Amino acid sequence: MKTRTLAAGAAGLALLLIAQPLSARGQKDAAQEAAKQIKIRMYASEYTPRARAQSDRWDPPTYLDKLRGEYRKTHPNVDIEFLPKIPSGPEFDTWFITQFKAGNAPDIGNQLFSEINRNYQKGWFLDLSPYLEKPDPYVAGNAHWKDIFLPGVISTGTAPDGKIYLLPTGINGTAIFYNKAMFQKAGASVPTTWKEFMEAQQKLKDAGFVPFAFNMNGARYCSNWTLRCLQDMLMDSKLNTIKGISGPIERTTIEGAGVSQKELVAAIKKGTYSAKDPQWQEPMRLLKEWSRYWDPSFASLDQNGAYMQFVTGKAAMVWMDISRVKQVAVDSLRQFDYGTFSFPTVTKESSPYSTGIAAPAIGGFTGDGEYLVDALTEKRGTREASIDWLMYVTAPEHYIPMVNDLGYYAPGLKDATNLSPALEPFVQAVQKGVFRMETYLRGLTVKYADQYYQTMQEYLAGRKDLPQACEEIQKYMNQAADDLVAQNGWTDIR
Amino acid sequence: MKPARSRPYRIASHLILIVLAALSLYPFLFMLMTSFKSNEQFYHGYFTPAWPLHWGNYAEAWGQIAVYFGNSISITLISVLAGLLIAALAAWAFARYSFPGSGFLYGAILVVLLIPGVLTLIPAFVVLRDLGLMGTHGALYAVYVTESLILGIVVLKSFFSALPEELVEAAALDGAAETQVVARIAVPLTKPAFLTVAIMNTLFCWNDYIWPLILLPDTRLWTVTQGLVSFRDRYAGMAAWGPLFAGFVIASVPLFLLFFSSMRSFLSGLTSGALKA
Amino acid sequence: MKERQAPRGLPAPMKTRRVRFASPQMVLCLIQVAPALAALAVFRYFPVLSAVWHSFFNWNGFDEGRFTGMANYGELFSDPVMGTASLNILAYVVIRVALNLVFPLLAALLIHHLGSSRAAYPYKALFTVPLVVPTMVVLLVWKFIYNPHDGILNRFLSFLGAGALARDWLGDFGTAIYAVSGLGFPWVTGIGISGFGMLLYLAALQGIPSELYDACAVDGVSGARRLFRLELPLIARQLYLVALLTVINTLQTYVPVMVLTSGGPGTASMVPGLYLYLTAFSYDRFGYACAIGVVMAAVLAALAAFQSRLNARAESAT
């Protein structure tokens, strides 16, 4: 009997001894399972890292790759895939819409705030507001994630329903680039007012140069920026009437925030914003005045064409955004010295409607780094990981070097230490204030924008006169207003 | 075969034809020239060749699209072959038999030709999503096979119908079964038609860009045309022209091989056989 | 049994066999036709019906949409852009059909009359090479050719001393749509499917029995008269096929316009296909876009019905 008990005890002990390491391994397995492999798909647009190719003229961005490597050291279970970049424009927009419709969108995406505002009701995007209240663990002493951003980031990223689906962390800006050699030869000086601007171009034209490479084909930036500046200056005295308040409207850093879409639609219905108003027509008149100095093929010239005209010394000036700064600096086609200036002020010498206010900055929180999170990350189990990765990327000590590495956009962060000096002026310009009312590109409907430009091109080509063009635009405006009322259910606007 | 014409006439013809050929080849030559240029060389002169030649463009382009070649080849091959098979089956039935409803059904197929493709883009996409084919090559097969069917059935049916009655009857009299008639007589005699349909559908599948863009987000499944996309927007809107065109050249090599390996039989088939007395 | 009349000198084509309803042969036929019909039903017919259905709605492509009856069609017929687009596409189709009929035929005739297939072969090969070039490349090349500053066209004109004719071909209201329609000089190999035209014509010409040529020589018929009396009628089928395919394809065009002018300047080169695309993807108005598509399909259907009646009349006349 004793031997049996001994044997049982020995067997029991033996079992215990064997079982111990087994259960320890079991625990490790469980722990590993908890730290499951997570894969995040991110569309990083211009920041998508890639290796330098032979045809590259400067180093392409690689910083996100570095960040990913660093992040993985502390988060070995998270794998981040950067999707290849798709050309911006109709292809990207088609891809963006179809991927969300199919439930196949990347976990972290990149898109303009205006597109978010067009599509947020479809439930595609995650509301980031609760996460913005949480502290960012990668920023020392941070209590709320949203505190690291400039206010413009939060306000631009807030959708009409008050939720924040987007973090537009990149600042875009513009400047007019000019050819110093041509200016010198023509005896022209850098203008600060519209009158001086026209005079300088006249001198350039007399010297046999094409003064300005203005482009109307493809992306409408050049004409759009011009109209925004002119409208902001020339309708300055009327902006508050349009908005429906009595006091003045200050300039902020949010594009078109002075007058909201709903207020604009109400103004159209009331007639305070009307194409028949000579004050409204003034920007068009000035634009036509300016068109004398444009490259005559402006209707078929696109942004790249305009850039080429400038850099090969065929046109004296071009208006570009900061993503071209790097390019112009290193382009071997450029054989001249260049400088930049901002859009001139329209004074009383050029228009009776001027109030003397300077031109607004063109820019805003529309540079790359406009992060959104797919609502389906919840289902996929990648939500927490995506947010954490975003908090990591947007921490200034990571974000600023990334921005410097690309060199196309400025950061929308409060803490901008070590920012490259070439990008600083753009942050300051935006801080001074941007245009207060957006009507030409994203303000009303896309269809209205197309119709407006088509009619404007006919006017500029002399095929329609101003009253006729304005009458048609008024019709389009009314239609757009009706469409928006129906779309949004604004029953309080008549 | 044809009457020969006088010498001066032939010389003049040759001259005109050479000029026409040279002009027609210009886009091809442009593609080749540009594939060897750097961006600077390109902007200096769009239309003329430039030295030195940048062979590196090819290395760069190949590096970009090599991965996708396999995808493109398998997708195109399977779609075209499957399309041919299905189309041939249907075309033979329509050509040889007149069964109740065949006129209506054939008319229905002709009608599909009339529908603007761009109209069906979104609804077809929705169907593919609901069938769970999104993000797989299966979706592309579905789209491409359907596309190739339309032309395939019409062309094959017209060629089948043009087969001489006597040959077909003779074979039937000899006791050949239906499938043998098809395999031994119909198909060989209409080989040029098969080749034509195959080539046209190959061109379409190989060069198509819209469907892979919206159906295949996973880059491992991408096709060659998608792979070339990144060259078009290298620096915030500016293209890397040299590698882009080098990529186009590389992408056209399989088509080149296909055409020229089948050209001889394609052309000889057209001029011989059942279409002639 | 259907009898089809063969062109003179060629053997009688295959006769179709009548199949009785519900016979085993009919089942076999249906089985053969089934896969094709199934694929077409799911990926073509159903989407089309869906599109037609949605054309009566105000639909943004995503949610339910509001029923609006004929409102989309009413808007379509009073939309000035559709008016411009329709005129433009008419010009485009007519021009491209003409180009696809004349120039490839010219080349085919020249090759055919060289008299030997050995001489013909290199030309066949040469004219096939352009087919390998992707359409996007052709469009880009032509965009450069039309470039107002450095483009070949303007440079060539000033070289000839006709510099005054040089203009912004793609940006000028008067020339934009014609510049897009006329691309592809010398129009022998066309773009895409029309590239096969020349080979088709050539094959057909080479299929004309030499006895007929001999007969012509004996009768003293040559040159233009022979072209119109003998050759053209015998290749009429191929000419007709190319014309039909060209019309079908070009009526829906939007890619060349999108790449070259985006419908501009203004709406001078807008075409219905592009307007459909913009309406659906840019303006979020899928219902209206479906209406445009339905109208386009209806026009094509009408054309098809019209031409099949012409065809029937022509066939009964021979």
Image (tube, coloured by chain):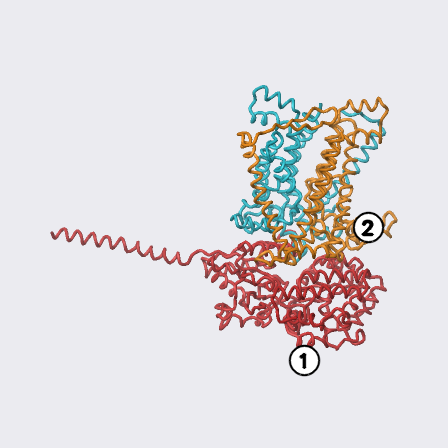
Chain colours: A red, B cyan, C orange
Residue A176, given in percent of the width and then of the height, sits at 73, 66
In the image, which disc is placed on residue C154?
A: 2
**Within 10 angstroms of label 1, few (less than 14), some, or many (20 or more) residues?**
few
Q: Residue furthest front?
A: C21
Q: Chain of mark 1?
A: A
Secondary structure type for disc 1: loop
Residue A467 lies, with reference to residue C130, above or below; the image says below
Q: Residue furthest left?
A: A1
Along the line of sight, which residue is nearer the eye, C118 or A274?
A274
Residue A74, given in percent of the width and then of the height, sits at 46, 61
Quarter of the image with the C terminus of chain A in it = bottom right
Residue B28 in view of the camera = no
Q: Chain of mark 2?
A: C
Does residue C203 appear to the left or right of B59 in the view shown? Answer: right
In the image, which disc is placed on residue A246?
A: 1
Residue C76, given in percent of the width and then of the height, sits at 70, 55
Residue C278 lies, with reference to residue B206, above or below; the image says below
Q: Residue furthest top?
A: B174
